[in-house]
Amino acid sequence: MRAVIATRAGGPEVLQVSDVPDPRPRPDEVLVRVAAAGVNFMDTYRRSGTYRMPFPHLVGSEGAGEVVAVGDDVTSLAPGDRVAWASAEGSYAELVAVRETDALPVPPGVDDATAAALPLQGMTAHYLVSSTFPLDNGHDVLLHAGAGGVGLLLTQLAAARGARVISTVGSADKERLARAAGASDVIRYRELSDLTTELPALVRDLTGGRGVHVVYDGVGRDTFDASLASLARRGTLVLFGASSGQVPPVDLQRLNAAGSVFVTRPTLGHHTATREELQWRADELFDAVAAGALDVRVGATYPLADAADAHRALEGRATTGKVLLLP
């Protein structure tokens, strides 16, 4: 089969498409013919060496497709079933082995692109609004990268819970997407000369001087100081990604000075640690899609051979919604 390999730690140029042996499912796995693979910042962190990985390694962890074979111990799936997943190493490929416990049955009426676009970013948005900081009516939210894959989904889920979303974006086109998803206010950060001071001032103007109850920050280094300064007293900064780079170590006295605020760095794996929790999150997302209450935007698709270009576009913040590879 064809698969994308990261040959060494580095930029997108280290990705190459190669012919490799077809995977064989272990007893607890299913073999899936990949219809679409999700491209995520986590893939770029692994490729660059930010996250420790062996090299070379097969890239990708998310996708959707059709089961073509099952391991001896698999009981809930059969060849011909359609599944999606958020955690299967080597998903930038024509075939991938997925653990039965990680495979999510795709409901009828959900197409392959939507199914591939939803698991990782959708369940991330779900745990952020339902578990890390459970949103409710009256909550004020600051959300960075509001037109990105997580951002558009998170905005919709937050607005559905009655929260007011203040979104930051980089362009007028992205502002339109953020507002369509339910953002009440949108700030174009590229129009600010000093993000660290000007953004918190704008946020406080919009919230009667209080600041927001929670900041969902997937950008990291470039936005962290502004996020911290935008919080209300005893607010929560949720750092769930680092698209601009990792945040340097933080003096905990800053949390005191900012108003006895909280900072957390959650991850999806800790919020889908059991099959029951994984299925609960997936079911709520697929049900919302089926009901027309959640729009999953696929902003760009690339052939498998152009995986490096997909990484360049993602890291260059040139994308909106979800980016997919099509084997």
Image (spheres, helix red, strand yellow):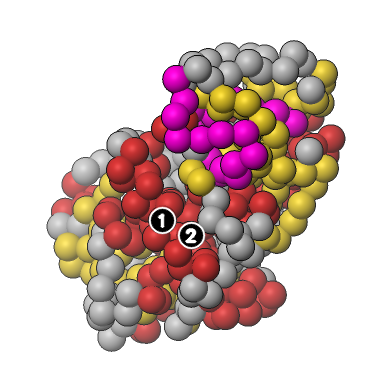
Which amino acid lies under the numbered mark 2 shown in the image of this protein? Phe
Q: Amino acid at mark 1?
A: Asp
Question: Where is the N terminus found, in terms of image quarters?
Answer: top right
107 above or below 78? below
**Residue at image mark 1:** 283
Q: Position of residue 242 (x, y in %)?
A: 49, 44
Q: Secondary structure at mark 2?
A: helix
Kindly report the secondary structure that dominates the magenta region of the rendered protein: loop
Side (left or right) of 1 relative to 179: right
Which residue position is annotated with label 2? 286
Residue, x 57% and y 80% (percent of image)? 180
Query: Residue 227: where, in percent of width, then height?
Result: 38, 60
Magenta residue check for 89: yes
Secondary structure type for disc 1:
helix
Question: Where are the magenta residues, as a range?
Answer: 73-99
Point 44% across, 29% down: residue: 75
Name the side, left or right, on which 222 lies relative to 301. left
Query: How many marks are shown on the rendered structure?
Result: 2
Is 16 or 96 nearer to us in this picture? 96
Residue 44 visible? The answer is no
